Amino acid sequence: MTKIASGPDELAPFIQDLVILLPDASWVNDDASYYIYEFVSEAWTLLLNINNMDKDKFMNNLNNLEQLYGALLQDLDEDSLYVCKAILDKLKFFSENSKYMNPDLLSRLYESMDDITYIDIYYRSGLLTGRLKKNKDMGEHGAFGASGTIDIQNIVSLFLHGREKVLDLGSGNAKALVLFSHKAANVTGVEIDEGLCKEGQHCIADLLKAERIDKNKIMLKHGDFFEEDFSQYDIIYIYWPFDNRKKDISEEKVRNQLEAKLLKEMKLKALFIVCLPGMDYRDLFPKLRKIDIDSKVATMPLLVYAHPLAGIELNEATVVRHKGNI
């Protein structure tokens, strides 16, 4: 258990109890506990930013958490519900007794979290306070939306073994990029929107300063990913920027152009992974070889593709935990 020095501060015990309520990134890869991770991480984000928002906004987010807790009552075991209820009660307590807040101790608790959770809460905090964009209309390029931590960690668990070179297409604020960097040999991101690219570079700088990522493993570039050479990468990832509920002629153009580039440049042992917004299960790239995966730990559909000529080149060393048929 992490120990936080309290010193003479009489308020420390009220925060010391929070040590046992810290989220753990290992929960993400367990389909029985990733709901707890989502709840507790969101609660911690709210707690760490209690002084960075007005009372109405805080209470609105607290009410949302209470509703989520109510929805989880029938799905979680007794121990899991205890953790969720305990952190929720702490939030309520501090909202009504602000004099017991000790930002320094809270900050040290935050710094004691594992790297993945620290990064996750960093991005959640940015969205909560408005420092980071949640989404952005990109015109003919679709729309920006941030990848979910659970979905990225699911990909990491299934397909990254520490040796891969990863390319993130349309990196936005670099969240997926920094999460991939913890397991990949190196990661490269390309973002066409200058504002989003600067936002992502700022996030990378913050996380480098916090010593949560390795500067030698991560690069974010401003540019068009169609100008990138795909042949040097083992994993190519994209959070699909189009919504199937909206008819967009740009989507077909981007899809056809991307499929042609992948067919031309993709390595035979490489994987192309698409995270789809909402519950969109379309087969976007029929000319590629679709791989069925069996993973319950995901909040959005994942499409996994290989080159159609991969054949025996795509073996168990490439997809260690793959349960479907290649």
Image (cartoon, rainbow, N blue to C red):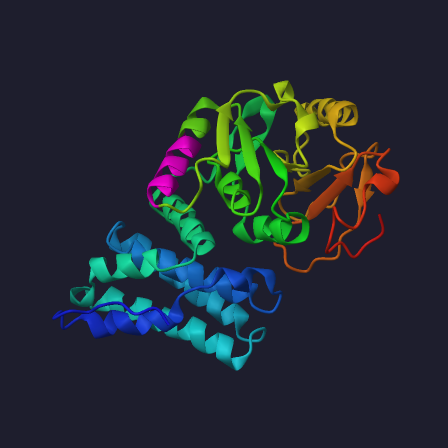
Residue found at the far left of this picture:
8
Query: Magenta includes 234?
Result: no
Query: Magenta includes 200?
Result: yes
Residue sitting nearer the eye, 318 or 107: 318
Position of residue 288 relative to residue 68, above or below, is: above
**Corner quadrant of residue 60:** bottom left
**Corner quadrant of residue 40:** bottom left
> In the rendered picture of this protein, how many numbered marks are placed on residues?
0
Q: Residue at x 39, y 59 (%)?
A: 113
From the viewer's perspective, tell me whether residue 37 is left or right of residue 97.
right
Residue 160 placement (x, y as % from top left): 64, 47
Q: Quadrant of the N terminus?
A: bottom left
**Whether residue 310 can be seen here:** yes
Residue 215 placement (x, y as % from top left): 43, 36
Q: Residue at x 20, y 63 (%)?
A: 101
**Whether residue 239 can be seen here:** no
Which stretch did the figure color magenta? 199-210
Residue found at the far bottom of this picture:
78
Q: Residue at x 56, y 54 (%)?
A: 150
Residue 50 placement (x, y as % from top left): 27, 56
From the viewer's perspective, tell me whether residue 262 is left or right of residue 166.
right
Instruction: Identify the main secondary structure in magenta.
Output: helix
Residue sitting nearer the eye, 69 or 228: 228
Residue 153 placement (x, y as % from top left): 57, 52
